[in-house]
DNA sequence: TGAATTTCATGCGCATTCTTGTTGTCGAAG
DNA sequence: CTTCGACAACAAGAATGCGCATGAAATTCA
């Protein structure tokens, strides 16, 4: 999962990035509205954390621009302001959630978790597929009840596949969501990780659709 | 759009119902957890407004039960409590949004609007023609309910035909859309793939219009 | 620094795709 | 009605290139 943080306070920015990375996300960040707007317009993020008070281009305008351009990724708004009318404006501009500063990092994490989860159409924090179970809060993975130790990339891959289970995911989509902007395109890293993951969770979980991508779960249904 | 309101304060309940109906929704309401839980489990709502402090069955439990039963409709939580840890608990239990009491009705309406709008984006889109069904999201194809395995090109071909069913598609149009610009003109690959597809989905699906191209669907006409 | 993790490179197996050639079908003209 | 030419369907071998395994190099992390 790939997240964009747009926050001008460099300290807070750093904290957010650190916390999100700690939680297993790939994070890009911008410190002003123009950069943020550009990134959000060009890169496929799974969620955005957006401060409203930004230099060069106001957060609300950034959001409105994205929505006008048809970008639909979930956006969590941060703001020092506390007036409810601002909240309504933000929500109607297309924000998906809202946190008032000062906030607890835990709360932001929970909300981002929920946004990403919901954007993929899941209501619960436990993602399961067959014998595989992933708890988004603790980051633990079990297969048939017994814990499995995954490396950070393996976890990201599995998490993405579980969020979008049943769907065919192209290799480019995976690289775009599991890595930040600069990544060597013609590389077989993804295949390597799919192979590793298969070894750990069972090779019949991830299906290969030759020429299109991979698909997890719901292999045999009518 | 049908909304469920679960709120024990009869005054507030009535206000919510009135405001939501005013906004054009069809609204059911319950004043305790058990009733609310039952309704949410049996009726298909597009969104739920749920108070946390309820008699007979706590709101959080109601929500958890719904999620455990696989109900995925968006839920907006109302609560008097303001401690952030409660918010996190609510969000992690599967709530989609959160409003602290006391609130402005405008805000609730804005959030419900947002929830409904977002949930609408998850309609699974499938293309069908006769017994053939193609789910664009999962890339699965079924004929008479039983799954059919297609290769990448076969899938693209079928998808294109389904998108333009009833229309006559020339062979050049197909090559132009299934291949990138430079493609050996005098080649019969398209016919080969039409043949393969016919073998897999039934030969009466794709009609040949001699000299013009192919047509899928709309079989019964002169 | 040492261990774990991630990335990169090579070669192979095989599903998929393409080509070729033949047979079959339709339409029009003699 | 017959015959001929053009177009389409089918089959099967050939070639392409995708995806996987494996191991070594590089990088990160403790």
Image: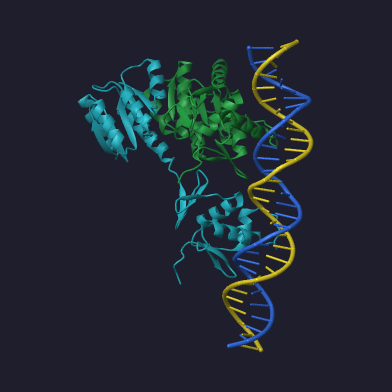
Chain colours: A green, B cyan, C yellow, D blue
Asked whether the viewer can see residue A36, the reply is: no
Q: Quadrant of residue A81?
A: top left
Q: Is residue B222 above or below residue A67?
A: below
Q: Is residue A147 above or below residue A176?
A: above
Q: Is residue B209 above or below residue B200?
A: below
Q: Position of residue B62 (x, y in %)?
A: 31, 26
Q: Quadrant of the N terminus of chain B?
A: top left
Q: Position of residue B150 (x, y in %)?
A: 57, 50
Asked whether the viewer can see residue A121, the reply is: yes
Q: How many marks?
A: 0
Q: Residue at x 54, y 53 (%)?
A: B159
Q: Position of residue D27 (x, y in %)?
A: 71, 21
Q: State the residue in front, B212 or A98.
A: B212
Is residue D18 toward the left or the right of residue A128 in the image? right
Is residue B186 toward the left or the right of residue B211 in the image? right
Q: Residue at x 34, y 38 (%)?
A: B46
Q: State the residue in front, A187 or B91.
A: A187
Q: State the residue in front, B30 or A76.
A: B30
Q: Position of residue B17 (x, y in %)?
A: 25, 33
Q: Is residue B200 above or below residue A128?
A: below
């Amino acid at each position: 999962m790939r997240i964009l943080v747009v926050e001008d306070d460099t300290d807070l920015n750093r904290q957010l990035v650190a916390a999100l990375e700690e939680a297993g996300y790939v994070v890009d960040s911008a410190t002003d509205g123009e950069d943020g707007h550009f990134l959000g317009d060009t890169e496929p993020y799974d969620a955005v954390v957006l401060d409203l008070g930004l230099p060069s281009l106001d957060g609300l305008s950034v959001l409105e621009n994205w929505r006008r351009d048809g970008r639909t990724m979930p956006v969590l708004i941060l703001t020092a302001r506390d007036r409810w009318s601002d909240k309504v404006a933000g929500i109607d501009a297309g924000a998906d959630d809202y946190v008032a500063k000062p906030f607890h990092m835990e709360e932001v994490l929970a909300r981002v978790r929920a946004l990403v989860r919901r954007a993929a159409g899941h209501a619960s924090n436990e993602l399961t597929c067959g014998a595989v179970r992933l708890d988004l809060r603790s980051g633990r993975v079990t297969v048939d009840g017994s814990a499995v130790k995954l490396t950070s990339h393996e976890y990201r891959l599995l998490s993405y596949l579980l969020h979008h289970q049943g769907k065919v995911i192209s290799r480019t989509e995976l690289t775009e969501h599991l890595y930040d902007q600069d990544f060597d395109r013609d590389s077989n890293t993804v295949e390597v990780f799919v192979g590793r993951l298969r070894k750990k969770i069972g090779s019949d979980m991830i299906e290969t659709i030759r020429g299109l991508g991979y698909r997890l779960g719901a292999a045999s249904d009518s």
